[in-house]
Amino acid sequence: MPRTKRSRIICEKPYCTKFSPDGAATSDTVNLTLDEYEVIRLVDLEKSTHEECANRIGVSRTTVTEIYETARYKIADAIVSGKILSISGGSYVICDGIACGCKRCKRKNPTEIKNDLIKKGDNIMRIAVTYENDRVFQHFGHTEKFMIYDVQDGKIVGKKQVDTNGQGHGALASFLNECGADVLICGGIGGGAQSAVKELGIELCGGVSGDCDKAVGDYLAGKLDFTTEVTCSHHDHEHGENGHACGEHGCGKHCND
């Protein structure tokens, strides 16, 4: 079964959606999708890195690179071959003007973003997932971003990426509480933070790894493999590039070395 393509977040639709070569008698058309257009705009016009672009549109850095290369080829084909270039379609959503950091966003201060997130509607369950490059980040205390999912009647009705602004461990539990989180999905988490999360009435689903969207989908379907007794006591240097990641090798369940 093919994997569902994730909708990419774009700032706004382009002002011009068709470019025709002067003097060329051709109807051949190259179509640039709106998510491809957005990647070109961010990388080539705003000079964003692929990592920064990935965070803005809500996909992995690898996916941004693939989109960028495809878009550049299409533009080159249109210019060199004298074809019409149109911009339409694709898998995208327009940003909500709150949290992605684009030019439409009215509030970029983390406190203001949290205050906005608190205002969740009736019968909404809010799930927070430790986030890095589309995957469940494996050390709660070092989490730089949460992906926040709003769920109503068992279906995801909203999704926002929120920067923690450098807070760590116990402070992150308060951060989640201020965001109105009902459920936390994460990899490894220390005992103190675990207790803080539970004391705030936030359901803890630890020891989880893999794709964030899939983890939330599995949780809603009652199929998520997690533990409520996850612990992690690794030091910072053990989570570096050459180290291992909690939750991916068993230490997401019990980490005591």
Image: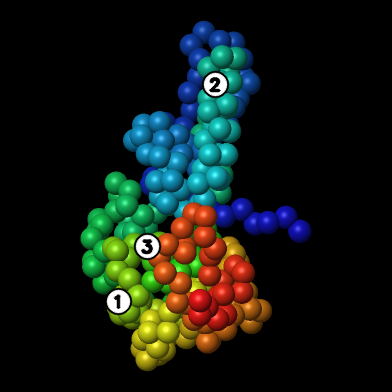
Amino acid type assigned to the residue bearing label 2 in the image: Ala
Task: Tell me how far mark 3 sits from mark 1, CA to CA.
Answer: 12 Å
Residue that label 3 marks: 144
Real-space Cα distance between discs 1 and 2? 49 Å
Amino acid at dot 3: Glu
Mark toward the start of the polypeptide (1 vs 2) = 2
User: What color scheme is it?
Assistant: rainbow
Q: Earlier in the sequence, mark 3 or mark 2?
A: 2
- Dot in front, 3 or 2: 3
Whether pointer 3 and pointer 2 mark residues with C-beta atoms closer than 8 Å, the reply is no
Q: Is residue 30 above or below residue 256?
A: above
Residue on which disc 1 sits:
171
Q: Is residue 138 above or below residue 154?
A: above
Q: Secondary structure at mark 2?
A: helix
Q: Which residue is mark 2?
A: 76
Q: The disc labelled 1 sits on which kind of residue? A: Ala
Let me know if residue 188 appears in the view: yes
On the image, the x and y values in percent for residue 56 come to 40, 50
